[in-house]
Amino acid sequence: MAALAQTITPELRRWIVAQAEAGCRPEDVLQAMKTSGWDEDIAAAALEQTLLERLAELRPQATVAPLDAGTPLPEPALETAPTVLVAEGHTVRILTSMRHPRVIVFGGLLTDTECDQLMALSRPRLERSKTVDNATGGDEINASRTSDGMFFERGETELITRIEARIGALLRWPVNHGEGLQILRYRPGAEYRPHHDYFDPVHSGTAKILERGGQRVGTLVMYLNTPEGGGATTFPDVGLEVAPVRGNAVFFSYDRAHPSTRTLHGGAPVTAGEKWVATKWLRQGVFV
């Protein structure tokens, strides 16, 4: 199929919806489109946009409401618009702050030594990254995520304990309401296509996932190195790109499991060198 003919038509959208409603996994639909001659990026964009629009049509209006009225969210102490915060004796700079979506970029959240230690400790345990299987609540390898990764147990080492305590103090959120720290390595060309971090209630596997600590309410992505090229954290709904700078971090929260939070985000392809990140997901309740 010639590139000029690859137009996302209403017929294509109807076909994608039909495949999804027949139980086909998105990665299988994507592979079928590629086999038919579709450019992978065009096919992935068509698939994502079509399925998001279809989910929005099917989702009951009630799911747009906040998780629980009055439930707090992780949030740093920015009421007085400070330029720096001190968390567990460590000074963190406030570089950028947005309200909707709630996005905050921190400077110097991790030291160079901590970044090096996290990479060194995780390197022997890296394996192909997985995503949540929405149908079962388990894990699966997904073509949209092309990184290597591993998880630390909460409090696994003194280093992890220190960083988790700093995060908890900075975001004013209990340490035991967080998942274990995840380390990811992106090689040249690797990426994570735009997605949401909350667990969508329309999926059959969500109920099982929520048993371990409730819904996710916030994400903190910490950059362990500065890649030679690419690798920005992107927020397509608002046109925001956060550069991956060693020691810095981007935090965003979401008060409902719905695209209206505008927290669709992704990891842009690395164009040169490697990108290493540490990710912390925050839950409503105690994560077990």
Image (cartoon, rainbow, N blue to C red):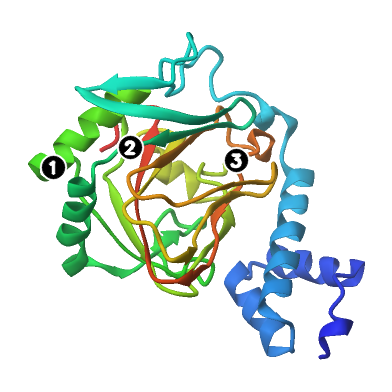
Instruction: Inspect the image, locate mark 2, and give the three-letter code of the amino acid beneath it.
Output: Gly
Q: Earlier in the sequence, mark 1 or mark 3?
A: 1
Q: Are marks 3 and 2 in contact (CB under 8 Å)?
A: no
Q: Which residue is mark 1?
A: 159
Q: Is residue 250 left or right of 254 when viewed as pictured?
A: left
Q: Indicate which disc residue 47 carries.
A: none
Q: Which residue is mark 2?
A: 108
Image x and y of residue 156, in percent: 12, 45
Q: Residue at x 90, y 70 (%)?
A: 9
Picture quadrant of residue 150? bottom left
Task: Pick the residue in front: 75 or 13.
Answer: 75
**Label 2: element kind:** loop
Q: CA distance from mark 2 to mark 1?
A: 16 Å
Q: Amino acid at mark 1?
A: Leu
**Mark 1 burial class by Cα count in 10 Å: few <14, some 14-19, many 20+:** few
In front: 112, or 266?
112
Characterize the local packing of mark 2: few (<14), some (14-19) or many (20 or more) Cα atoms within 10 angstroms.
some
Q: Toward which corner of the image does residue 214 lie, by quadrant?
A: top left
Q: Residue furthest top?
A: 80
Q: Is residue 24 above or below residue 206?
A: below
Residue of label 3? 263
Q: Give residue 212's position: percent from left, percent from top.
A: 33, 39
Name the side, left or right, on which 169 lies relative to 7: left
Residue 274: quarter of image = bottom left
Q: Is residue 125 above or below residue 256?
A: below
Query: Residue visible at 20% across and 66% down?
Result: 123
